[in-house]
Amino acid sequence: MTAGELGPLTALGAVLSPLDGGPRTDAVVARISAAIGLGVMADGEQLPSEIDLATQLGVSTMTLREALAVLREQGLVETKRGRGGGSFVRASAEALTSRSLARLQEYSVQELRDLGDEHFAIAGAAAVLAARRAVAADVDRLRALAGKLNDSTDAVQSRRADSRFQIEVTVCSQSSRLTRAEVGIQAELSEMRWLPQLSIDP
C-alpha cells in the first residue's frame, strides 16, 4: 500500500509498526482504528492482504482475523468476498463518534490532563526538531495539510486534517520515536477533542 508514504519515515508506517507485548487482538484493533480515525487510512481504502498486514503488525493471521471481526462489528471495516474482495475502511461519522464517546467515558479528569501534558511535551520537541531539519518539500506538505484543515467542512474532516498535520510535523522531525509517540497520543486524544458535542482542551 502506498497511502501515507512520505519517505523513509511515514505516518502510516508509524501507525502500523510491529506491536509490543500485551493482548494482541485488542492491540491490532487499536492500531487499525487509529489509522482509520486519524485519516491515515481513508474511507473506502482497501487494507493490505491479511498475510501482509499480519506480517507488518507482527501478529498471526488468526489474531488479525479476530481483530477484523471486531472492527466489522464496530462499523469501521467491511469485508467483501470473491473477485475484487478484501477488507475496506468504512469510517462513518456515526461509528467514529460512538467510539469516541465510549473512549471518553473511560478517562478521569486527571488522566485527560496527563494526556494533554504528554502531548505538549512530545509535540513541542517535534516542532523544534522539525524547524531545524525540515526541507522545502516538507514545508510544502505541511502547508497543504494546513490548507485541508482550513477547508474542512465537518468535525470528522477537521479532526483527521488536524491529526495528520501534527503527525506530519513529527515526521519532519526525522525522529521515529517521536513519530510513534505522536501517533499514539493522537489515537487517544484527537477522537475526543473533536467530538461534536464537546470541546476538550486538557
Image (spheres, helix red, strand yellow):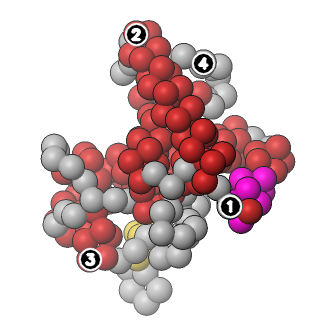
Q: Name the kind of residue labelled 3 in the image.
A: Ile
Residue drawn at x 48%, y 34% is 122
Viewport quadrant of the C terminus: top right
How dense is the environment of label 3, judged by Cα within 10 Å: few (below 14), some, or many (20 and up)?
few
Is residue 92 something one can see in this rendering?
A: no
The kind of secondary structure element at disc 2 is helix
The kind of secondary structure element at disc 4 is loop
Position of 201 relative to 45 (above/below): above
Q: Name the kind of residue labelled 2 in the image.
A: Gln
Q: Where residue 2 sits: x, y (%)?
A: 53, 75
Q: Which mark is residue 41?
A: none
Which of pointers 1 and 3 lies earlier in the amino acid sequence? 3
Residue depth check, mark 1 versus mark 3: number of the one nearer the observer = 1
Residue drawn at x 55%, y 50% is 173
The residue segment tinted magenta is 137-144
**Main secondary structure along the magenta-highlighted residues:** helix
Residue drawn at x 22%, y 58% is 66
Q: Name the kind of residue labelled 4 in the image.
A: Asp
Residue depth check, mark 3 versus mark 4: number of the one nearer the observer = 4
The residue to which callout 1 is attached is 135
Q: Which mark is residue 51?
A: 3
Q: Name the kind of residue labelled 1 in the image.
A: Val
The residue to which callout 4 is attached is 201
Which of pointers 2 and 4 lies earlier in the amino acid sequence? 2
The residue to which callout 2 is attached is 110
